[in-house]
Image (spheres, rainbow, N blue to C red):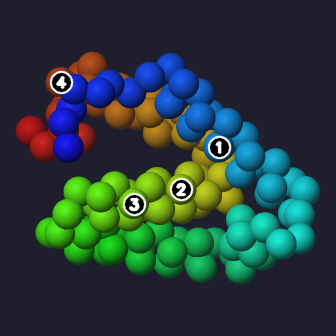
Amino acid sequence: MSLDKKITKKDYKFLVELEELLYERKAEMPKGSYTTSMYKKGIDKIAQKVGEEAVETVIASKNDDAETIAESADLLFHLMLLLAEKNIPLHAVIKTLRKRHDKGNHKHIGE
């Protein structure tokens, strides 16, 4: 997979829309929604699912790129679900990454 294709404003907008949807589902709890079922199971199950998806992402990374991308998408979704359950906005995580980067603390990029 090439890094020639950069993330677009449309991609960022989708992440914002997904986060909004997660909060909507939390407020409305519509029947038949996977997200609703996870919210009903509670923080422990959501956190467990994040862990499972993290492990699956690591395993997939040893295989092919398509599998790694699919598992990474699952991980990102469940992480966003966990953040929404805890009422932590995604921008708080992004701001922390930016703050670390601005201070020259590049642990987030492996330095």
Which residue is denoted by mark 3 in the rendering? 70
The amino acid beneath tag 3 is Ala
Q: Earlier in the sequence, mark 4 or mark 2?
A: 2
The amino acid beneath tag 4 is Gly
Work out whether 38 lies above or below 76: below
Location of residue 15 in the rendering, given as x and y in whole percent from the top left corner: 57, 37
Looking at the image, do the residues carrying marks 3 and 4 touch, with CB atoms under 8 Å apart? Answer: no
Number of the label disc, if any, that sits on residue 77 = 2
Location of residue 109 in the rendering, given as x and y in whole percent from the top left corner: 18, 38
Number of the label disc, if any, that sits on residue 104 = 4
- Report the Cα–Cα distance between label 3 and label 4: 32 Å
- Report the Cα–Cα distance between label 3 and label 1: 17 Å
Q: Nearer the viewer, mark 3 or mark 4?
A: 3
Work out whether 11 lies above or below 53: above
- Report the Cα–Cα distance between label 1 and label 4: 31 Å
Element type where label 1 sits in the image: helix
Which residue is denoted by mark 1 in the rendering? 18
Kindly identify the residue that appears in the image at 63 percent across and 72 percent down: 43
Element type where label 2 sits in the image: helix
Location of residue 102 in the rendering, given as x and y in whole percent from the top left corner: 27, 19
The amino acid beneath tag 2 is Phe
Looking at the image, do the residues carrying marks 2 and 1 touch, with CB atoms under 8 Å apart? Answer: yes
Location of residue 54 in the rendering, given as x and y in whole percent from the top left corner: 35, 68
Element type where label 4 sits in the image: loop
